[in-house]
Amino acid sequence: MLQEEVEEEEEEEEEEEEEEEEEEEEEEEEEEEEEEKEEENEQEEEEEEEEEEKKKQQILLVCIGNPPYIFTSQTVIAFNH
């Protein structure tokens, strides 16, 4: 009887340890996924910023006589002095 009880307790302890290990692994996986999502978000933000910079660079200021004109890829805006 005593040996059976000891064996049962050992089995329970092993099961508990396995469960704890599984939980830890799941937590680690979740953390990794969160880190990956954060990295993706940062990359997207950087790409958006780069696109905005490119748009700003597309605007050319050209002075032809009086008044100066600003040429963009879509519109031409004239400024009067």
Image (cartoon, grey):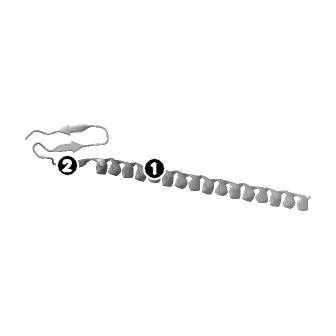
In the image, farthest residue toward the right: 1
For label 1, the crowd category at 10 Å Cα-Cα, with few meaning under 14, some 14 to 19 and many 20 or more, is few
**Residues at badges 1 and 2 in contact (C-beta under 8 Å)?**
no
For label 2, the crowd category at 10 Å Cα-Cα, with few meaning under 14, some 14 to 19 and many 20 or more, is few
- Tell whether 56 sits left or right of 3: left
Q: Nearer the viewer, mark 1 or mark 2?
A: 2
Identify the amino acid type marked 1.
Glu
- What numbered label is drawn on residue 8? none
Per the image, label 2 sits on a secondary structure element best described as: strand
The residue that appears at 40% across and 48% down in the rendered structure is 48
Measuring from the top left, give residue 29's x and y in whole percent.
62, 55
The residue that appears at 57% across and 55% down in the rendered structure is 31
Per the image, label 1 sits on a secondary structure element best described as: helix
In the image, farthest residue toward the front: 65
Q: Quadrant of the C terminus?
A: top left
Q: Quadrant of the N terminus?
A: bottom right
- Tell whether 31 sits left or right of 4: left
- Rounded to the nearest angstrom, the CA distance separating label 1 from label 2 is 33 Å
Measuring from the top left, give residue 11's x and y in whole percent.
82, 58
1 or 2: tag closer to the N-terminus: 1
Label 1 sits on residue? 44
Tally of numbered tags = 2
Label 2 sits on residue? 62
The residue closer to the viewer here, 16 or 36, is 36
The residue that appears at 77% across and 56% down in the rendered structure is 15
Identify the amino acid type marked 2.
Val
The residue closer to the viewer here, 24 or 32, is 32
The residue closer to the viewer here, 15 or 3, is 15
Measuring from the top left, give residue 7's x and y in whole percent.
86, 60
The residue that appears at 49% across and 52% down in the rendered structure is 38
Measuring from the top left, give residue 56's x and y in whole percent.
29, 48
- Tell whether 63 sits left or right of 59: left
